[in-house]
Image (tube, helix red, strand yellow):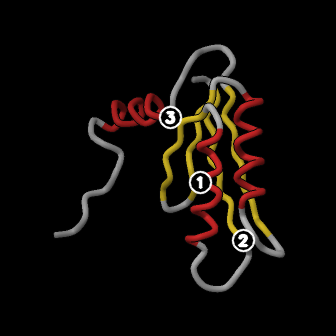
Amino acid sequence: MTVVALLSVAPVIEGSMASEVAKAVAALDAFDVEYETNPMGTVIEADDIDELMLAATAAHKAVDGDRVSTFLKIDDKRTADTTAESKVDRVAEELGREPRSAPDE
Protein backbone atom coordinates (compact mmCIF):
# COMPACT_ATOMS: atom_id res chain seq x y z
CA MET A 1 0.00 0.00 0.00
CA THR A 2 1.32 3.40 -0.86
CA VAL A 3 -1.06 5.94 0.67
CA VAL A 4 -1.05 6.31 4.46
CA ALA A 5 -3.20 8.83 6.29
CA LEU A 6 -4.19 9.92 9.77
CA LEU A 7 -7.93 10.54 10.00
CA SER A 8 -9.76 12.06 12.95
CA VAL A 9 -13.52 12.61 12.71
CA ALA A 10 -15.59 13.83 15.64
CA PRO A 11 -18.76 15.74 16.33
CA VAL A 12 -18.33 19.02 18.18
CA ILE A 13 -20.26 18.10 21.34
CA GLU A 14 -19.88 17.95 25.09
CA GLY A 15 -19.40 14.53 26.65
CA SER A 16 -18.34 11.27 25.09
CA MET A 17 -17.89 11.13 21.33
CA ALA A 18 -17.27 7.36 21.30
CA SER A 19 -20.55 6.33 19.67
CA GLU A 20 -20.14 8.85 16.84
CA VAL A 21 -16.46 8.01 16.35
CA ALA A 22 -17.46 4.33 16.15
CA LYS A 23 -19.82 5.23 13.28
CA ALA A 24 -16.94 6.89 11.42
CA VAL A 25 -14.66 3.89 11.94
CA ALA A 26 -17.40 1.43 10.90
CA ALA A 27 -17.91 3.38 7.66
CA LEU A 28 -14.35 2.49 6.62
CA ASP A 29 -15.32 -1.19 6.36
CA ALA A 30 -17.12 -0.52 3.07
CA PHE A 31 -13.83 0.40 1.37
CA ASP A 32 -10.65 -1.35 0.28
CA VAL A 33 -8.55 0.12 3.09
CA GLU A 34 -6.75 -1.18 6.13
CA TYR A 35 -6.99 0.82 9.32
CA GLU A 36 -5.99 0.93 12.96
CA THR A 37 -7.63 3.21 15.49
CA ASN A 38 -5.63 4.84 18.27
CA PRO A 39 -6.56 7.42 20.96
CA MET A 40 -5.97 10.36 18.61
CA GLY A 41 -7.41 9.10 15.33
CA THR A 42 -7.32 6.29 12.82
CA VAL A 43 -4.39 5.42 10.56
CA ILE A 44 -5.68 4.36 7.14
CA GLU A 45 -3.77 2.66 4.32
CA ALA A 46 -4.98 2.34 0.72
CA ASP A 47 -3.55 1.40 -2.65
CA ASP A 48 -4.53 4.73 -4.14
CA ILE A 49 -5.57 8.21 -3.11
CA ASP A 50 -9.04 7.94 -4.64
CA GLU A 51 -10.04 5.00 -2.42
CA LEU A 52 -8.59 6.72 0.63
CA MET A 53 -10.53 9.92 -0.08
CA LEU A 54 -13.78 8.01 -0.61
CA ALA A 55 -13.28 6.22 2.72
CA ALA A 56 -12.46 9.46 4.55
CA THR A 57 -15.53 11.16 3.08
CA ALA A 58 -17.76 8.26 4.15
CA ALA A 59 -16.33 8.40 7.68
CA HIS A 60 -17.02 12.14 7.85
CA LYS A 61 -20.59 11.72 6.61
CA ALA A 62 -21.27 8.85 9.05
CA VAL A 63 -21.01 11.16 12.07
CA ASP A 64 -24.24 12.82 13.21
CA GLY A 65 -24.26 16.33 14.55
CA ASP A 66 -24.79 19.96 13.78
CA ARG A 67 -21.03 20.37 13.48
CA VAL A 68 -18.39 17.74 12.60
CA SER A 69 -14.65 18.31 12.77
CA THR A 70 -12.43 16.23 10.47
CA PHE A 71 -8.64 16.21 10.28
CA LEU A 72 -6.93 14.31 7.44
CA LYS A 73 -3.16 14.14 7.04
CA ILE A 74 -2.02 12.20 3.96
CA ASP A 75 1.37 10.71 3.07
CA ASP A 76 1.14 9.73 -0.61
CA LYS A 77 4.56 8.27 -1.34
CA ARG A 78 4.48 7.81 -5.08
CA THR A 79 7.98 6.47 -5.69
CA ALA A 80 7.86 3.34 -3.49
CA ASP A 81 5.45 1.04 -1.73
CA THR A 82 5.28 1.63 2.00
CA THR A 83 3.02 0.78 4.92
CA ALA A 84 2.26 2.35 8.25
CA GLU A 85 3.90 -0.66 9.91
CA SER A 86 7.12 -0.23 7.91
CA LYS A 87 7.28 3.42 8.97
CA VAL A 88 7.07 2.43 12.64
CA ASP A 89 9.59 -0.39 12.08
CA ARG A 90 12.14 2.07 10.67
CA VAL A 91 11.79 4.31 13.73
CA ALA A 92 12.20 1.27 16.01
CA GLU A 93 15.33 0.30 14.10
CA GLU A 94 16.82 3.76 14.65
CA LEU A 95 15.87 3.72 18.35
CA GLY A 96 17.09 0.18 18.88
CA ARG A 97 13.78 -0.60 20.62
CA GLU A 98 10.02 -0.33 20.17
CA PRO A 99 8.95 3.32 19.87
CA ARG A 100 6.75 3.40 22.95
CA SER A 101 7.32 4.20 26.57
CA ALA A 102 7.06 1.52 29.23
CA PRO A 103 4.37 2.16 31.82
CA ASP A 104 5.58 2.86 35.33
CA GLU A 105 5.18 -0.15 37.56
Question: Farthest residue in the top direction?
Answer: 79
Residues under numbered marks 3 and 1 in contact, where contact means CB atoms less than 8 Å apart? no
Rendering quarter of residue 63: bottom right
Residue 6 vertical placement versus 103 (above, below): above
Circle 1 residue: 25
Residues under numbered marks 1 and 2 in contact, where contact means CB atoms less than 8 Å apart? no
Q: 85 or 36: nearer the eye?
A: 36
* Residue beneath the point at 59% across and 40% down: 44
Question: Farthest residue in the bottom direction?
Answer: 14
Circle nearer the N terminus (1, 2)? 2
Q: Amino acid at mark 1?
A: Val
Q: Amino acid at mark 3?
A: Ala
C-alpha span from label 2 to label 3: 26 Å
| Left or right of 48, for residue 40 | left
* Residue beneath the point at 57% across and 56% down: 41
**Crowding near pointer 2: few (<14 within 10 Å), some, many (20+)?**
some
Circle 2 residue: 11
* Residue 101 position in % (x across, y down): 31, 56
